[in-house]
Amino acid sequence: MPDRIALEKIGLNYGASVVLNSVNLTLTNPSVTGIAGPNGSGKSTLLKIISGNLSPSRGKLTFYSGSNEIPEEEVFVHLSFSAPYIDLPEALKLGEFFSFCGNLKKWKEGLSTDQVLKMSGLERFKGRKISNFSSGMKQRAKLTAAILQDTSLLILDEPGTNLDTKAKSWLSELLKRYLDERIVVIASNEGSDLEHCSQIIQLPS
């Protein structure tokens, strides 16, 4: 599993527009790092690069276990990622979705899928199709699956999006319990999203 991630002079262009320019960052396990910056500064882009969902235009991204490099294609099993723009399989019922996630990657602390469902606060909707969920319920489902999967790299983009005050308190408690022994990266400008971060990287506009 990766215990260190090195970003060296990472940059990305969309046509003539520079989205990221020469980002240097080292992430180690354990750590909780916040990525802040104005809209358009590249917060989500940086998370997509770290997660392997986007290739940088320049620079190098390297995953390490000890002194050994880990091929990027082997990182997926150790990674969980939640973002408002990631679509859920809306044809599935909520219970089916969590069963799928639990089969894909085991849950932390040996939790069962039923226990994870209960911890989401959505247990009574187990038999409802995700297509009938509100945006806040979908965000809860995404966050629950990402945080409770037994992964060493957790990436959260704007985790408080679509959550009301009660749900944000739920999220804070869940994070407080399951941040240990992981590399955690959270992109947001909301103080409540970044409250558990030990360092915050500010991207320029």
Image (cartoon, helix red, strand yellow):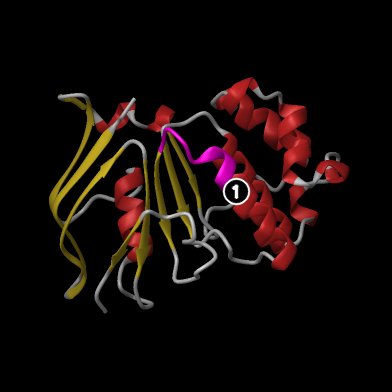
Is any atom of residue 111 visible in this view? yes
Which residue occupies the foreground of this view, 97 or 78? 78
Residue beneath the point at 85% across and 45% down: 125
Which quadrant holds the C terminus?
Answer: bottom left
Residue 118 magenta-drawn? no
Which quadrant holds the N terminus?
Answer: top left
Which residue occupies the foreground of this view, 195 or 184? 195
Percent x, y for residue 43?
Answer: 35, 64
Q: Amino acid at mark 1?
A: Leu
Looking at the rendered structure, the secondary structure element under dot 1 is helix
Percent x, y for residue 203?
Answer: 27, 70
Q: Is residue 159 above or below residue 116?
A: below
Residue 105 occupies which quadrant of the picture? top right
| Residue extent of the magenta highlight | 176-182
Is any atom of residue 92 visible in this view? no
Residue beneath the point at 65% across and 66% down: 162
Residue beneath the point at 52% across and 62% down: 193
Residue 177 magenta-drawn? yes
Residue beneath the point at 67% across and 47% down: 141
| Residue labelled with disc 1 | 143
